[in-house]
């Protein structure tokens, strides 16, 4: 199998939309990395397991970010780009004044506008000493970047991180969202999370939206944005662009018709989306 400059097989990025439940259609996209289709390293779990076995997890995370940034820029996708990093890799990239992170966040040698990037803290490694990790994460804010806690409510992503880091985004784990329409306890937990997020000025994103009932339930609770296969799966093109500038309260049926079946929708819708993408790309930093 051919290897790229970082010593890994060729990688490519797919992008899953994060949809605003009220207001503009797209908050942003989470970048997810993939290996060669049909190979043993096609899926991220296998890729990262292999990288850990050969002591190259840091290199893989950095290469994944480069690949995602390049593809995202080429597609001129709107909104924020959510990039995944482990705590261990973030500690390294944020050493000193965060020069390593800023060097990474470039496309063709040009820096990406920091306000368009959200650094997503994953569950791959523990944070270690919380005080020193919180200081490292402050560097992101100083550099104009925002950050999110992934899989909140499981593993390492719990209340201590929320208190110590005060993230701008919290992605609520699918285990708390699945079946929420029929589970009063899950609803109460999400209400508590929303109260905490309001207290720190952050935004909650519900992960794992897989049916209309879950979408309706989190929307009624006041969740700002959501992500899941019901709203759009990972796609190499990022799925559909937003319908039009200023469109509000997108219906889930319209969104699904544009994204979940892998098509661009009807010709009129695709034309509107393309026009919107051109406007966004002309005003967005590349």
Image (cartoon, helix red, strand yellow):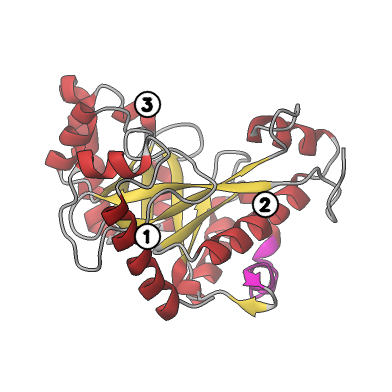
Extreme residue in the front direction: 267
Image spot of residue 170 (x, y percent): 37, 48
Residue visible at 44% across and 53% down? 29
Mark 3 falls on what kind of element? helix
The picture quadrant where one finds residue 48 is top right
Mark 2 falls on what kind of element? helix
Q: Is residue 190 above or below residue 223?
A: above
Marks 1 and 2 close (CB-CB < 8 Å): no
Image spot of residue 275 (x, y percent): 34, 68
Q: Earlier in the sequence, mark 1 or mark 3?
A: 1
The numbered disc on residue 175 is 3
Q: Label 1, label 2: how many angstroms apart (C-alpha)?
A: 23 Å
Image spot of residue 7 (x, y percent): 86, 48
Number of other residues with Cα within 10 Å of mark 3, as a class: few under 14, some 14 to 19, many 20 or more: some
The numbered disc on residue 168 is 1
Residue range corresponding to the magenta coloring? 93-107
Q: Which residue is at the front of the view, 283 or 127?
A: 283
Question: In the visual, does 252 lie left or right of 277?
Answer: left
The numbered disc on residue 64 is 2
The picture quadrant where one finds residue 27 is bottom left
Q: Which residue is at the front of the view, 273 or 225?
A: 273
Image spot of residue 101 (x, y percent): 65, 67
Question: In the visual, does 36 lie left or right of 247?
Answer: right
Mark 1 falls on what kind of element? loop
Q: Earlier in the sequence, mark 1 or mark 2?
A: 2
Q: Is residue 242 above or below residue 48?
A: below
Q: Label 1, label 3: how many angstroms apart (C-alpha)?
A: 21 Å
Q: Which residue is at the front of the view, 67 or 74?
A: 74
Residue visible at 22% across and 56% down? 198
The picture quadrant where one finds residue 220 is top left
Residue visible at 37% across and 31% down? 174
**Image quarter (top left, top right, bottom left or bottom right) of the N terminus:** top right
């Amino acid at each position: 199998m051919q290897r790229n400059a970082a010593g890994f097989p060729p990688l490519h990025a797919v992008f899953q939309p994060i949809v605003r439940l009220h207001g503009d259609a797209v908050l942003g996209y989470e970048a997810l990395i993939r290996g060669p289709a049909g190979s043993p390293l096609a899926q991220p779990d296998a890729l990262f397991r292999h990288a850990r076995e050969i002591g190259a997890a840091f290199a893989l995370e950095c290469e994944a970010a480069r690949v995602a940034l390049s593809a995202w820029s080429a597609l001129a996708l709107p909104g924020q780009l959510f990039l995944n990093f482990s705590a261990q890799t973030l500690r390294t990239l944020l050493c000193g004044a965060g020069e390593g992170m800023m060097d990474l966040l470039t496309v063709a040698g040009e820096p990406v506008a920091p306000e368009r990037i959200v650094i997503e803290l994953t569950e791959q490694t523990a944070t270690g000493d919380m005080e020193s990790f919180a200081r490292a994460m402050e560097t992101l804010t100083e550099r104009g970047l925002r950050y999110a806690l992934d899989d909140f409510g499981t593993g390492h992503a719990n209340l201590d991180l929320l208190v110590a880091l005060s993230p701008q985004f919290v992605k609520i784990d699918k285990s708390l969202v699945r079946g929420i329409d029929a589970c009063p306890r899950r609803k109460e937990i999400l209400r508590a999370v929303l109260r905490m997020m309001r207290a720190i000025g952050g935004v909650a994103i519900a992960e794992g939206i897989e049916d209309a009932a879950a979408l309706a339930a989190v929307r009624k609770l006041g969740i700002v944005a959501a992500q899941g296969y019901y709203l759009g799966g990972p796609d190499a093109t990022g799925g559909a662009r937003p319908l039009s500038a200023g469109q509000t309260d997108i219906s889930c049926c319209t969104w699904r018709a544009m994204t979940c079946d892998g098509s661009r929708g009807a010709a009129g819708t695709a034309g509107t989306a393309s026009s919107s993408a051109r406007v966004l790309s002309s005003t967005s930093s590349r």
